[in-house]
Amino acid sequence: MMARSVLTEARQIDIARDLIELDARLQVLEAEVSLSRERLLRLYREVKGKSPPKGMLPFSTDWFMTWQPNIHSSLFMNIYQHQFKSSDLEPVEALIRAFRLYREQVESLGMPEVLSVTRAWRLTRFFGAGMLGMTECTSCRGHFVTHSFELSHQYVCGLCNMPSRAGKTRQAVVGREPATTCAAF
Amino acid sequence: MIDASEEVSSVRQPAARSAVQRLNDEIRDANLTYLMLAQQLIRADRSEALYRLGLSGEVADILDSLTTAQVLRVASSNMLLARFRFDDSMVWSLLASPKRDEAPSRMHAAILMASRTTTESV
Ligand SMILES: [Zn+2]
């Protein structure tokens, strides 16, 4: 009994540390591991050498529907669903693994990380609540994050049907937009 | 005339055989490299390996359990064991897209590859 609780706690600390290393917000840690707020704050300072940023989490699903965030969210969610389905991982472990694979992928493409781990966590929560889902693009058969009420028989993704803004100022969008969206988060 | 042609064919035949042999050696090397890489990935992190390799859990477990002697035996085949995972032209045309369209095309390819991998494993 005693030994098990120590092991459970060690596992919780591992998960918390992984999340902190990926720059998760304190609210994510509090939701995912059963360690006290004081211990999480101490762990955060030990890992990052500073206090966690303060502020509210965004509650809207709309951010995930905008062009560039949608593409990044869709990449992440495909990876997450694979990690979740192909092994006996807890949702939070699948989140950590999928986010690392997402980060590796965008880095190898030379792209900025548009999705933060906190956003990614919210995304999985929105999926769990049935507010967001995956819809197959009728043109490329890729799976993309959409509102659950999206009409799947006529859905075309943002990459098959690129908005003119994304096409024309692509380099500017790729270079600039994440800086503002990430900083705000 | 006749002597000359006989001489040519007698020279060519062993050469042709060794070309086939060379191709078989290269296939065996590719098989060996693939199997060893797969084992290495599976042993380092199973769930990540399933994603990177696009293998089912069952096949991954079999590959994981192979001894070195078994790997060598399995690899020495004249059939290539690994094949292209994404067998639709869209993924390949996106990956091979011209440089100026690179960023969105490569992102599109990454999403399609991840989508196909997710569908395969379910
Ligand atoms: Zn599409």
Image: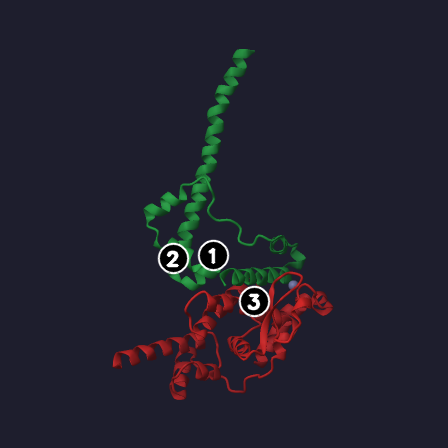
Chain colours: A red, B green
Residue A103: horizontal and vertical position, in percent?
51, 67
Can you say whether B79 is above or below A87 in the image? above
A176 sits left or right of A38 in the view: right
Does label 1 or label 2 sit earlier along the sequence?
A: 1
**Numbered label attached to residue A75:** 3
- Local packing at callout 1 (Cα closer than 10 Å; few below 14, some 14-19, many 20+) is some
Q: Nearer the viewer, residue B65 or A44?
A: B65
Q: Residue furthest front?
A: A153
Residue that badge 2 annotates: B61
Secondary structure of the residue carrying numbered label 2? helix
- Local packing at callout 2 (Cα closer than 10 Å; few below 14, some 14-19, many 20+) is some
Q: Chain of mark 2?
A: B
Answer with the quadrant where ligand 1 appears in the image: bottom right
Secondary structure of the residue carrying numbered label 1? helix
Amino acid type shown at disc 1: Leu
Residue that badge 1 annotates: B53
CA separation in Å, label 1 and label 2:
13 Å
Q: Chain of mark 1?
A: B
Marks 1, 2: nearer the viewer = 2
Amino acid type shown at disc 2: Asp
Q: Nearer the viewer, residue A182 or B72?
A: B72
